[in-house]
Amino acid sequence: MSTMQTEVFEAFRAIDIPEEKALKAASALSKRDEDVTGLKSDVNIIKWMMGFVLAFQVAIFVKLFMV
């Protein structure tokens, strides 16, 4: 178990939730964290792609009207 998952598990056990349910809940929360990390990396890639497209469009606009 990771540190975060262990902390969540111990917090659930401290409020008298059965061990099996506490373990499942802690695992579900760690799965959610992995999903969020994946989404953050995808959004970062999309930001770079949009920045490139915007820079390319500005370059075309400048070339059309300034030359």
Image (cartoon, helix red, strand yellow):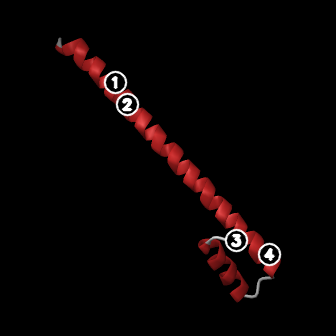
Q: Secondary structure at mark 2?
A: helix
Question: Relative to 34, does residue 58 appear above or below in the rendering?
Answer: above
Q: Is mark 2 in CB contact (under 8 Å) with mark 1?
A: yes
Query: Could you tell me how far apart the alpha carbons at marks 2 and 4 are, in whole angstroms?
Result: 47 Å
Quadrant in which the N terminus is drawn: bottom right
**Residue 56: x %, y % from top left:** 34, 24
Query: Could you tell me how far apart the alpha carbons at marks 1 and 4 are, in whole angstroms?
Result: 53 Å
Q: Label 1: how many residues lie within 10 Å, few (<14), some (14-19) or many (20+)?
A: few
Residue corresponding to mark 3: 26
> What residue is rendered at 60% in x and 74% in y?
3
Q: Label 2: how many residues lie within 10 Å, few (<14), some (14-19) or many (20+)?
A: few
Residue corresponding to mark 4: 21
Q: Amino acid at mark 3?
A: Ala
In the picture, measured across the screen, residue 65 lies left or right of residue 21, that is left
Q: Nearer the viewer, residue 8 or 3?
A: 3
> What residue is rendered at 79% in x and 81% in y?
19
Q: Identify the mark at residue 56; answer none if there is no mark.
A: 1
**Residue 22: x %, y % from top left:** 75, 77
Q: Secondary structure at mark 1?
A: helix
